[in-house]
Amino acid sequence: MKVAAIDCGTNTTLLLIADVVNGAVTNVYRDEIVVTRMGQDVASSGRFHPAALLRMDECLNRYAKIIKEEMPGRVLAMATSAARDVSNAKELFAIGDKYNIPIQVIPGEMEAQITFQGATFEHEAKDGLCVIDVGGGSTEVVACRNSKITGASVNVGSVRLTEMFVTKMPTPENEVMKLLEYASDSFRKAQAQLPQPPLREVIAVAGTPTTLAAVLQNKNYSEGAVHGFRIEKKTLEQWIHRLAAMSLEERIHTTGMDTKRADVIVAGSAILLSAMNALGAVSMSVSTRGVRYGIALHAARG
């Protein structure tokens, strides 16, 4: 079945149009990403910012045209952390209705399940696999043990923590330390819900790890270069401080950097490191799959 899956995240809005056959995403027709920064000021105001809603309107208008061209059998859009935290979510739903794209807000537990399914559908044996999804507003950590998928949604994200702690770029060391302390403390508080080591494989999805994978290889982003790349914890620790010491302009011109992610990459990296520490992981593999793939699988199941 040909489906359209839209992931309305805190930082980015992604569209995947693909075939789903026997529980696997096969032919990918379109894989689009727009940095909509839907979570702008949500942490401080508890509402979607008018500018963020305007960006969502422009994005969904564009996606609606692509969907019309591709004619999928089913369309499913899901909104994650930012939409769970606001008092004016109806304004987002109205934009979706305007373009015949109904939007569902998914709870953190369901987001974790969908993320895991999307990131691991290519793996035959799932026991012992753990997925980290660093979003703009929250981070999902989920694993499979004895054929049961469990995990937690931790209320730390790259946009949220950047707004909370980063005042300038280059980012002073004291701000980096506050980022790391806050992220580590958040994972400590969620420790009882987190997957416990040992884990067979830790897989990182979404923009933070895929951007880091390209930067660490000094290569422009491509799925071939990024998917399956392994990041060591020691390397990540070094690069957090290296990226923090750069101006925004220097980050933007770093080979492999997603230019619209340059301002939040330090916070995202700090969250990723904190998650690895909480899981007892010394390395992780990067996947270009994730929520949108899980939404596609969900859509195909009806």
Image (cartoon, rainbow, N blue to C red):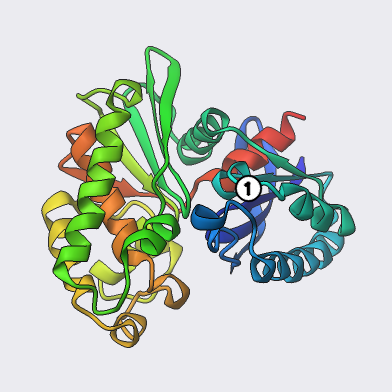
Is residue 111 left or right of 270 when viewed as pictured?
right
Is residue 284 left or right of 17 when viewed as pictured?
left
Q: Which of 156 and 141 lies nearest the eye of the viewer?
A: 156
Q: Which residue is mark 1?
A: 86
- What secondary structure is found at the residue carrying circle 1? loop
Residue sticking out furthest to the top: 146
Residue 56 in the image: state x and y as whole percent: 70, 64
Q: Which of 60 and 171 lies nearest the eye of the viewer?
A: 171
- The residue at the point 18 percent across, 72 percent down is 172
Based on the displayed image, in which of its 4 quarters is residue 149 positioned? top left
Q: Name the kind of residue labelled 1 in the image.
A: Val
Is residue 76 left or right of 289 when viewed as pictured?
right
For disc 1, the neighbor class at 10 Å (few under 14, some 14 to 19, many from 20) is some
Please give the count of numbered marks on the rendered protein: 1
Residue 207 in the image: state x and y as whole percent: 43, 59
Q: Which of 195 and 137 lies nearest the eye of the viewer?
A: 137
Residue sticking out furthest to the front: 45
Residue 219 in the image: state x and y as whole percent: 32, 75
On-image quarter of the C terminus: top right
User: As displayed, is residue 286 above or below residue 301?
Assistant: below
Residue 168 in the image: state x and y as whole percent: 30, 77
- The residue at the point 30 percent across, 21 percent down is 192
- The residue at the point 59 percent across, 32 percent down is 107
User: As displayed, is residue 283 above or below residue 163?
Assistant: above
The answer to whether residue 284 is seen in the rendering is no
On-image quarter of the N terminus: top right
